[in-house]
Amino acid sequence: MAVRRLTLLGATGSIGASTLSVATHHPERFEVTALAAHRNWQALRELCRRHRPRYAALSDETAAMALRQGLRDDGLKTEVLAGTAGVQAVAALPEVDTVLAAITGAAGLLPTLAAARAGKRVLLANKEALVMGGALFMETVRSGGATLLPVDSEHNAIFQCLPGAAQQCGTRAPGVRKIILTASGGPFRETPLAALRDVTPEQACAHPVWKMGRKISVDSATMMNKGLEVIEAHWLFGVPAAANVATSRLAKISGAPVLPYFPARRADNAGYVITIHPPLENFPSSDPVADTRRFHELIEQHTHRHP
């Protein structure tokens, strides 16, 4: 199996950390070529010490200068690029074949477009690229000859449900009538509508299951996040959003962690459900490889066909 050379856009975030954990446990499959972030040069310096990438990039130019000096002090030869142009450059490196796009917000759009334009295998964990510029982004993927793979959990599970021949993002799978995105409902799922006017930001951020940043927690509590995911699903799977993407609550499986399930209903009314694992931090083991085996066991136990 050929080694995949990676650029991580958003390396200092939680998705970046998970990706680097996978790369560390599978050095025969992945090589970390470039790491990029916004301004947290101290965290990126530590990642460079651990993973020794050829390139590092920070969109904040002052932070990039500090990183450059810090890596010199460490005796590392990692080349530091600065500014938005620097982040776009590491997204399009000729020696890189796979780019994880996990920069939060609008800042992620231009480097993700650069990766698509360069024909990379783009692992998309950034909703904003599709919410802000869906038509432009999908056209860039097509014209650049890129391969687009959704990493966001709901959309990745839907992608896995599709027939192999239909796993080309932007193309509607034959026979798929409706896609259903699950939603936990957040902390206010059982709250009467009349009481919502008095809730506080602290209550909105107290998700009953997941530990997340404040913005995504508020988006979850208000269901805004599901609105963004409906738009994302529309562009990824070629399904008209208004008529054919819906949401439902999460299923709870007795004796197991809360496992999201993601139905896709075919035109012949056969429904298939796939469950995927929760993040690593929801398991107590210190061995991610063992946790991964447990995840696959849970998938086998709880993936099932609905009549």
Image (cartoon, grey):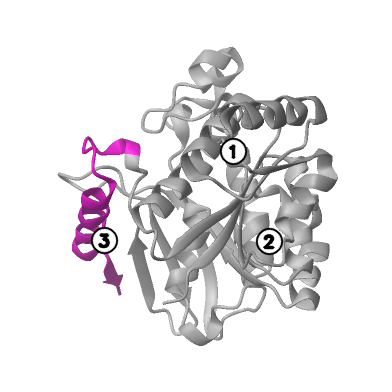
User: Which residue is at 33% across, 36% downward?
Assistant: 281
Rendered location of residue 176, percent (x, y): 53, 78
Residue 263: image quadrant is bottom left
Q: Secondary structure at mark 3?
A: helix
Rendered location of residue 77, percent (x, y): 63, 43
Tell me the distance, in whole angstroms, between the alpha carbons under discs 2 and 3.
30 Å
Query: Any mark on residue 76, and which?
Result: 1
Q: Nearer the viewer, residue 143 or 299?
A: 143
Q: Nearer the viewer, residue 111 or 299?
A: 111
Location of the N terminus by quadrant is bottom left
Residue furthest to the left in view is: 255
N-term-proximal mark, 1 vs 2? 1
Q: Few, some or many C-alpha atoms within 10 Å of disc 2 (few <14, some 14-19, many ≥20)?
A: few
Circle 2: residue type: Ala
Tell me the magenta residue range: 281-307
Q: Secondary structure at mark 2?
A: helix
Residue under label 3: 299
Q: Few, some or many C-alpha atoms within 10 Å of disc 3 (few <14, some 14-19, many ≥20)?
A: some
User: Which residue is at 51% across, 36% downward?
Assistant: 49
Task: Evaluate whether residue 112 shows in this view.
Answer: yes
Location of the C terminus by quadrant is bottom left
Rendered location of residue 123, percent (x, y): 58, 60
Q: How many discs appear?
A: 3
